[in-house]
Image: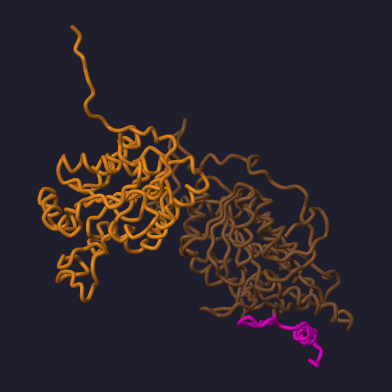
Amino acid sequence: MATQTRVLYERPQALLPVRMHYCPGCTHGIVHRLVAEALDEFDLVERAVGIAPVGCAVFAYDYFACDMIEAAHGRAPAVATGVKRVRPDLFVFTYQGDGDLASIGIAETIHAAARGENITVIFINNAVYGMTGGQMAPTTLPGMVTTTTPKGRDPKLAGHPIRVCELLSALEGPAYLSRVTVTDPKRVRAAKRAIRTAFQAQLKGLGFSLVEVLSTCPTRWGMSPGKALEWVESNMVPFYPIREFVVAEGLREA
Amino acid sequence: MPFTRGERILMRGNEAVVQAAIDAGCRAFFGYPITPQNQIPEEFSRLLPEVGGVFLQAESELAAINMVYGAAAAGVRAMTASSSPGISLKQEGISYLAESELPCVIVNIMRGGSGLGNIAPSQSDYFQATRGGGHGDYRTLVLAAWSVQELYDLTRQAFDLADQYLTPVLVLGDALLGQMMEPMVVPTEVVDPATLPPKPWATTGAKGRPHNVVNSLYIDPAKLEEVNARIQERYHRAQREVRYAAEQLEEAEFAVVAYGTAARVASSAIQQARAEGIAVGLFRPITLYPFPHAAVAERAERVKALLVVELSLGQMVEDVRLAVEGRRSVQFLGRSGGVVMTPAEVLGRIRAVAGMKEQ
């Protein structure tokens, strides 16, 4: 009797077979995979355009198999707007970090959300500028040590962190806003569901969708990958609650 | 306002820009309000939806130029417009467009500077326009109009040049040209965007081909140098696009060099000088980049001296001096801050250059 092989796990078609540059234990790889799985499942690779940020995910254009555009720092939602407005038939997503999205690009983020721009934003929040060496981010927690807050972030001097989902919840434009993390398999599955829902928001033409993923930076946090995952749960999740913030009518998956 | 194509009509400069863009097949405009170019976004907001195009008022100049970046990457003829301080804000995006080899058109209805300056006509963005403007090793093609008709013609041609040389193209007007109404003819033939050549590099969905990437990041210096050399090569090829106009330069002993509004003032002064018997003519660059260096050098050989007239404290005069290479005296008359010189002022300088006593 011939042996039957059943494929349980393989590289998504939407991820090119190339070696990624991410540090060991960084959760970018997990999130890339989840986005790629969703692109495959909705059969979007041939009509998607991804916008890569400036930050650790800057080379995302080399990893996703769909058409890709590299944006200037923080400008991805504006670039995505330009693509989507002239080609509404394309599926347009951005993939941005916290410095890109919540600091230098906060205006583009808020206005794309306020317009209800029919794009999907994948937002990686790891509370630090990873690529540039570990400086304070707009989402750095109070007391957190970075290379530009050597004694820990003092909100009196360096201001308070920005909770992006809560901020955008005040607007009429978003169709889907959700915060997730990827610290264990259950969390990963929930993150996948959120990304799928965000994709559906765009596919149904409901407006702006954003999934914030609490992520790790073992390198800049100076922790092992395992410790970094624990740190997300014990420090970030209490400050950045894991939940859905906006879910438009008719968005629940069947 | 309704008009008949092919007939002489009265049109405002800013409106001519919009009509030209739509006639060129431009189907996307992204902009931000700033005086004195506001009729441009206003007209686009009215006209683009009628032809199935996209108008969007952006939250900032930065967002506007980056929306142009996205629309251009998706293969559509797209443009933005602004005025001097707004163009400064767009420089980041223009640098990215240039390095990503994306075609687009940017109209600068120049106003007085520096800083917030004022809303009066000026040409003080010449350096910014012709030297690249943002960071990096790039230029943009720069076309300078001197009439409403030319604002139409050059804006329209700018889209072809942008596609041909894969570069942002700047069209320069000023507060005077943008705001004034003048007789002009809108041609009868228009471009149907569906008939434009395909852009195989555009991010339109990776169907039946490897994915396209629009990018300006080349982490390997050798690769970046290679890309920059490729872009530079296009600038060299674009030398054949050099355009200029000459008035009464045959048999002239003196040449006035001026573009845009300054050239109109100079042209009036030259008529008066001719009436006084001074053999003076006008050399008017239309492409500011590529600058007509060879033509200026050749004309310089045939005159005794040149006078450069600008609405700035001396910017294009540097290009003229580079072209003349010290072989002739190059003198300068400039007004700044939004002040437009009178023909009498220019006439006085023409007399002085011609060795006559100023009156």
Q: Horizontally, is B293 left or right of A59 in the view?
A: right
In the image, farthest residue toward the top: A1
Q: Percent position (x, y) of residue A85?
A: 50, 49
Based on the displayed image, in which of its 4 quarters is residue A161 positioned? bottom left
Color of chain A here? orange
Residue A68 appears at what percent x and percent y? 41, 44
- Can residue B8 be seen in this snapshot? yes
Q: How is the image coloured?
A: by chain
For this view, does B327 lie left or right of residue A154?
right
Viewport quadrant of the C terminus of chain B = bottom right
- Residue range corresponding to the magenta coloring: B331-359
Residue B112 placed where, x, y %? Answer: 59, 78
Residue nearest the observer in this picture, B84 or B253:
B84
At 19% from the left edge and 12% from the top edge, which residue is drawn? A3
Chain brown in the figure, letter: B
Q: Is residue B172 left or right of residue A138?
A: right
